[in-house]
Image: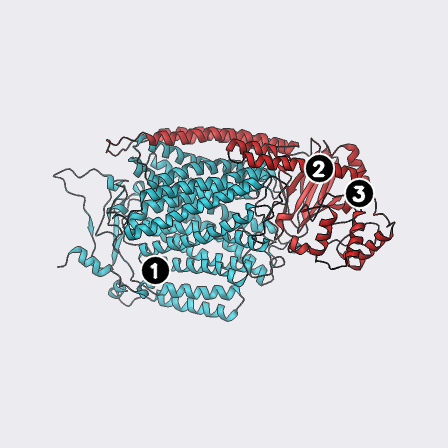
Amino acid sequence: MATLVERLDRTWEAPTGAWSWLTSTDHKLIGRRYLGTAFFFFIIAGIGALLMRIQLALPRNTFLGPDTYNGIFTLHGTTMIFLVSTPILFGFANFMVPLMIGSRDMAFPRVNALSWYIFLFAGLLLWSSIFFGAMPDDGWFNYVPLSGPEQSTGRGIDFYLVSIVFLTVATTAGSINVIVTAFKMRAPGMSVRRIPIFIWTMVVTSFAVIFAYPALTAANILLYMDRHHDTLFFNPTAQGDPLLWQHLFWIFGHPDVYIIFLPAVGIVSTIIPVFSRHRLVAYPLIVLATVAIGVVSFGVWVHHMFAVGIPDLTNSFFAGATILITIPSGIQYVAWVATIWRGNVIWKSPFLFVFGFFVLFLIGGFTGVMFGVIPIDRQVTDSYFVVAHFHYVLFGGAIFPVFAGLHYWWPKMTGRMLHERWAQLTFWFMFVGFNMTFFPMHILGLLGMPRRVYTYNDNIGWDALNFFQTVGAFVLGFGVLLFIINAIISTYGGEDAGPNPWEANTLEWAVNSPPPPYNFVVLPVVRSADPLWDPPTPEGEAEPSALELADGKETYGSSILDAEAERVLPMPQDSPWPMFLAIGALILAIGLLFDLLPATIIGIAIATIVLVAWTWPPATKEEAMTL
Amino acid sequence: MQDETRHSRAPELKRIHRTSTRTTSIAATTLPGLLFLAQQSGLTSALDPKGPRSELIARFFWALLALAAVIFVIFVALFLIGSAKHNPGDQRLHFANGTGVVSVFGIAIPGVILLVIFGATLWALNELATPASAAEESIEIVGHQWWWEIHYPDHDFTTANEIHIPLGKDVHVKLTSADVIHSFWIPSLSDKLDMIPGKTNEIMLKADTPGIYRGQCAEFCGAQHANMILRVFADNDDTYDAWIANQQADAGIPDSDLLERGQQVYFNNACMYCHTVAGTSSSGKIGPDLTHVASRDYIAAGMLENTQGNLAGWILNNQSLKPNNQMPNFVMSPEDLQALIAWLESLK
């Protein structure tokens, strides 16, 4: 009889080679791809930001013309929201959710593979607009009528519409996957009171995706119809309504801010206890706060529209909700401070990035309350003040936690430590550069500088601040470059990480770094919210039972509330169908984008055939187990 | 008379600009310096209010900023002090509960503060809601890509890109758009309000101090969104009445060969299909009304000072100055150009 590990290796070990790379359904591989792809988009959208900063460094600069500038800021915003912030957090989720809940994969590994392919294709489709000389150029919220058929005659807006709708398939599928995984696949004993906070935030975010994205999809399809099939949904000269677009877009758009923000603070709530050597204070309140944010975030969208002329009475409800949503964030701030205060803090690079988040999101939160105050909102909205605000909220509030997460989980994902000194240097360059770039934007906005201007006159008093910001942007960019260098150095010469270098509390640290394909040799049983911090079993008592499951590609399914083991779930083998389905969908998207009927038909045909093949029922149970 | 007013203002304008630019370079490095700077740049600063709307908003803003600063210092201090007291000898893990602390400092206290802020918001909205019946003057503004069409319905004339309002009086402004969404924003006087095609928004404007107040379109409206600038002149009564009287008049008849030739060049180049010059057969509506173009400080929607050189550059080469604007470049002999500019300069 072979040992347990040998039997698991035999069942789970994937063959190497290009084909198996393309067809793999291992959540860890897909998670790393998600992170890598999103990071790639982060770099190119960041380079776009540097180009914009060069243009704005001097008044009446001619480095970029208006068309190029407007295209770049549109791609920058669209990419950072759709192709960086959301997917990078789903990347962490893909890698970490099964590990943190003690499972062997996501609930739907092949859907997971599909999500990544569609995400990649949608991103490349959007950016390919550059090679067609047709960058979308109406900003990431793409207001009509400027994006309508009369005003935007090129293909630029179509690139935006089609790739975003295409992408929402990936995000929605990913969300369903996360919810089912978190609900049904937790280790026995991981009842709702013991679920790691990052899982909670991912679940709430995933629900928000499922409810928010349909509004975006609807808006994009309506505009696509206006542009390609002569409908008049948004055309004011035919009683269409430009404000309909804004409502639909922001019904999606504001929850989306929290879709990005919640998992980011989930990372923060994960890291603070580890480096404070103290469990998370007020865990139930933080969970409630997370859920509350998810719900209330659907009631604040009109604060993006306070200046469109909606009656004050209507506006004031949304102002109330906007101010109210501060409370759940406040709960988390107090809980973090209490955790730190009662703990015994060790300052390491992940904690340093959390500190950066703490400071920056505090500032972004204050300006956020100001946007709930309708008169102040109307004074500063659409100015550089709002550009400052949402960079504090999204870069400070989400990208800093992402970097905290990268530094925290890097050893788990690669098996190697990042160089700590370099990591701290990365932080300081990013933190100082960030504030140099974005803090002065508050002032510029108050000085009357609107957002999205490709140039400005030299006699208004905006020159010095703009130049200063451009310098700051390069300092920030240098910080990111340091991280990339550190990552490369660590890959080839980093210290061996071992299973749990931070002496952390959650299950992903119970397995080797990087984890084997089956994650856990024996599936864990959980007795507390911080399983790795449980006191050692007293001598003479039995160790808690662990579950062996080594006779097939299997994991446990458990009940929703108490996580009692219910059944053995077979896990699928690697499969090429997700890749083929994504290719079919890509051909369909290209057909719709360029009005190529044959491509549309071929795309639909491929997708249909692949779906049939993918879901073809296996003949026998034995066959099902080996699929 | 009108001409003198304009030129006497121009140097003043420049002086303010120069001062603020110099202050910028000195003060830019420190936070207090930056806030000081925000107070100094008079023409276009939300924090240097010159009318009741901006005044109230600026006060509210400063109050919130002070509150935020206090909370910021408290939280960052708590974080740093709490995390600085590291005890390397202590290897234990800690499991204290803090639900009570979090409930008080995370829910109860912020709840009360936020309730007050919300109440103040409702109060401020009420303060700002001046009824249209209180208005002593009314203006209609239509946004275009990328300029501002301005009507004075009570005085029956049209102008562009520069508004005059009587000092200390409530002015009722109606806003709409001819193409895409634009947004009306004069930071020193007022918060912004969008200009939406097919919809009319209304706002009350009032200035308490004489001066020129600058604003820019605040909703992205296409390629030249950056060059859609509006100026509001807050005039005392005499100046204002004189300005209105002048704007109501038709353009004068050319009284020299040069001006006659200039007018001829204007018509020969088909300018009348896009522009209006009241008193002539030129009545196009696509571009700005030129009846009194020489009375304005700037051309190209606030982008270029209204000088002979800039006018000439604009006519010959506007597509490289302001790419994608709806006016084509014109080719003409130097003599024709000179005559055309002389005629335009005569439209005071």
Of the two numbered discs 1 and 3 in the rendering, the one whose residue sits closer to the viewer: 3
User: Which badge, 3 or 2, comes first in the chain's sequence?
Assistant: 2
Residue B80 placement (x, y as % from top left): 37, 31
Residue A551 placement (x, y as % from top left): 20, 59
SS type, badge 1: helix
Instruction: Quickly name the residue at label 2.
Output: B11
Residue A110 placement (x, y as % from top left): 34, 60
Of the two numbered discs 3 and 2 in the rendering, the one whose residue sits closer to the viewer: 2
Question: Which chain is drawn using cyan?
Answer: A
Q: Chain of mark 2?
A: B
Q: Quadrant of residue A157?
A: bottom right
Q: Give the distance between the C-alpha atoms of the residues marked 3 and 2, in whole angstroms.
A: 23 Å
Q: Give the distance between the C-alpha atoms of the residues marked 1 and 3, in whole angstroms.
A: 72 Å
Residue name at image x 51 percent, y 42 percent? A469
Residue A47 placement (x, y as % from top left): 47, 52
Q: Chain of mark 3?
A: B
Instruction: Quickly name the residue at label 1.
Output: A110
Which three-letter amino acid code belongs to the residue tagged 3? Gln
How many marks can you see? 3
Instruction: Quickly name the residue at label 3.
Output: B247
SS type, badge 2: helix
Q: Are the residues under badges 2 and 1 in a single subunit?
A: no
